[in-house]
Image: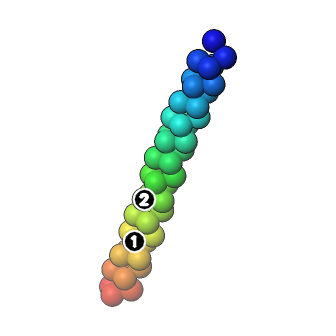
C-alpha cells in the first residue's frame, strides 16, 4: 500500500509538472505573438 501511494504521488507530480510546462509554453507563445502583432501594427501605423 505504501509503495502504491508513493508511485501514485510520483505520477501525479509528473502530470502536474507536464501541465505546468504546457501552460508555460502556451504563455510564452502568447507573449511572442502579442509582441510581434504590436510591432507589426506599430510599423504599419507609422507608415500612414
Q: Is residue 13 visible?
A: yes
Cα–Cα gap, marks 1 and 2? 11 Å
Residue 16 drawn at (x, y percent): 55, 36
Crowding at dot 2, Cα within 10 Å, few <14 / some 14-19 / many 20+, comes out as: few
Is the residue 26 above or below the residue 48 in the image? above
Residue 8 drawn at (x, y percent): 57, 23
Left or right position of 19 against 45: right
**What residue sits right under mark 1 in the picture?**
36
Picture residue at 46% right of the left edge, 54% below the top: 25
Q: On residue 26, which mark appears?
A: none
Residue 42 drawn at (x, y percent): 41, 79
Left or right position of 43 against 6: left
**What residue sits right under mark 2 in the picture?**
29
Residue at the extreme right: 2
Is the residue 47 above or below the residue 9 in the image? below
Quadrant in which the N terminus is drawn: top right
| Mark before the other along the chain sequence, 1 or 2 | 2
Tally of marks: 2
Q: How is the image coloured?
A: rainbow
When asked about the image quadrant of residue 29, the answer is: bottom left
Is the residue 6 above or below the residue 39 in the image? above
Picture residue at 33% right of the left edge, 85% below the top: 48
Residue at the extreme top: 1
Instruction: Decide which of 17, 23 is in the foreground and name it.
Output: 17
Instruction: Decide which of 35, 25 is in the foreground and name it.
Output: 25
Q: Secondary structure at mark 1?
A: helix
Crowding at dot 1, Cα within 10 Å, few <14 / some 14-19 / many 20+, comes out as: few
Instruction: Decide which of 31, 9 is in the foreground and name it.
Output: 9
Amino acid at each position: 500500500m505504501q509503495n502504491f501511494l508513493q508511485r501514485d504521488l510520483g505520477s501525479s507530480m509528473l502530470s502536474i509538472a507536464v501541465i505546468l510546462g504546457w501552460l508555460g509554453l502556451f504563455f510564452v507563445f502568447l507573449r511572442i505573438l502579442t509582441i510581434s502583432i504590436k510591432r507589426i501594427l506599430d510599423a504599419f501605423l507609422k507608415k500612414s
